[in-house]
Amino acid sequence: MPIWQPRLNNPAGEPIGTTPRELAAASIAYHRELFNEEPTGTATAPATWSLIGEHTDHAGGIVVAALAQWTTSVSVAPASGDTVSVAIVGEGGVDRREAEFAEILALAAAKQDEDPVRATPPPPAGPEIRLGGLVWTMVHRQLLSRDTRGVNITVISTIPQGCGLGEDAALETATALALYAEDTREAPVRARLAEACTQAAIMFNPTAPLRARHTVALRGDRSRVSVVNYADCSVTQIAHPVSATSGLRALAVSAPFTPGTAGGNTTEPQVLLQRRRFLDEAARAFSVESLRLLPDAPTRVADWLAAMHEVVSRPDLPTLTAARDWLGFWEDETLRAQRTVSALRSRRRSDIARLLGESQEDLGARYQLISTDGALAQLCLARGALSARSSSAGLSSAVIVLIDARSTENFSADLSADGLLVVPLDHGDVASPAS
């Protein structure tokens, strides 16, 4: 399998480039052709990749993530009826989907009536439902007019599926920016849009969303890594591990997958949802926004859970052993993320590699989310990678690799010859409306 290099054409059949500007121009051209109208908004959003900490996102921890050069572009226009129409342009042609807004309203009403402690994941849904859900969410958050119902949406993307590079988050982010008609340059506006994207994903996407992806896509920096710290909801920028001075390159390496499929998901959404429900219920029990804000959280939450098991019989509660493993992992992973930030600032390559290796080992040992990506990480390390860590453990069978720049070409060629997909990760541009 070759190194990832998508080949897309414009409506005239001519090859197009992969920069955000070129993709935006292509999505506008396709929208004109497919919907016979001028789009009222166009925006692009980048792929995102996590260095460490993504599994502490819902626990109030620290996520260290970066932007990649692969991009999704979305063009939108209001529709005359009450239908959400989505046209997705790919190498194989155009995939068109439609959903009545009434169906989206019914799904939203059902989710709002659920008990949050025992909520079930949304049923599998196509992009027309997920993006219609985003429209509904933006209306209810007063980011769109209350009259908004029908929308025509055209999508073109170079982000590979199933590699843990946030293809869903990029689609949601680009759509939100394209729909939002006002100035999006200020951080508070971008924070509101990120929150809307995450809320829509929770309600309408069966895959547990990583809220840091929306935040980093909207508030990141091309040449630096973003640190999302949920203790104070701050977003700061630090030195990127991939630069001319660091001598490192980043790659995503994935087991083969079929475009248009889920990309080798390794965990049912219910598994991650159970852990999030446990976090939410424990936080409510102690009246804190997240367990990160609760002193001595692992001990106190374990004691609370033990008491719950004594007085109630609930199959949705985790065992005490499993909960202690999760709590210990979340606390240790947050500390590793803090130390990784320090190592990045001081360019300590050996410390970065050690911390990422410890995280990868703990993902399997205590958090139990490693499957084929664990073996893939070992293969990459054996081939000379400085570090290899699951890109989205539990949802993808891919790994993020840091490797000496001098070895990148041979490393990539060897893995491609083995039938693996290799995706170069260069610096990407923050999500923005097309100018």
Image (tube, rainbow, N blue to C red):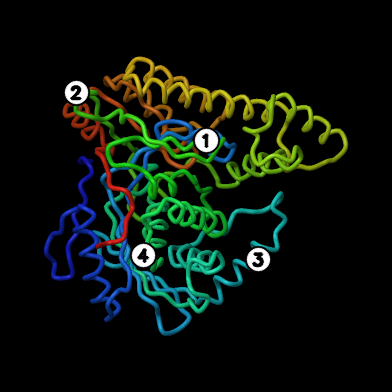
Select label 4 or label 2 by which is in front: 4
Secondary-structure class at tag 3: helix
Secondary-structure class at tag 2: helix
**Image mark for residue 55:** 1
Q: Give residue 254's position: percent from left, percent from top.
A: 33, 38
Mark positioned earlier in the residue sequence (1 or 4): 1
Q: Nearer the viewer, residue 178 or 314?
A: 178
Select label 1 or label 2 by which is in front: 1
Q: Is residue 331 left or right of residue 413?
A: right
**Image mark for residue 178:** 4
Kindly check if marks 2 and 3 are in contact, taking CB atoms under 8 A apart as contact: no
Quadrant including the C terminus: bottom left
Mark positioned earlier in the residue sequence (1 or 3): 1
Of the residues shown, which amino acid type is indicated by label 3? Ala
C-alpha span from label 1 to label 4: 29 Å
Q: Which residue is mark 2?
A: 407
Secondary-structure class at tag 4: helix
Secondary-structure class at tag 1: helix
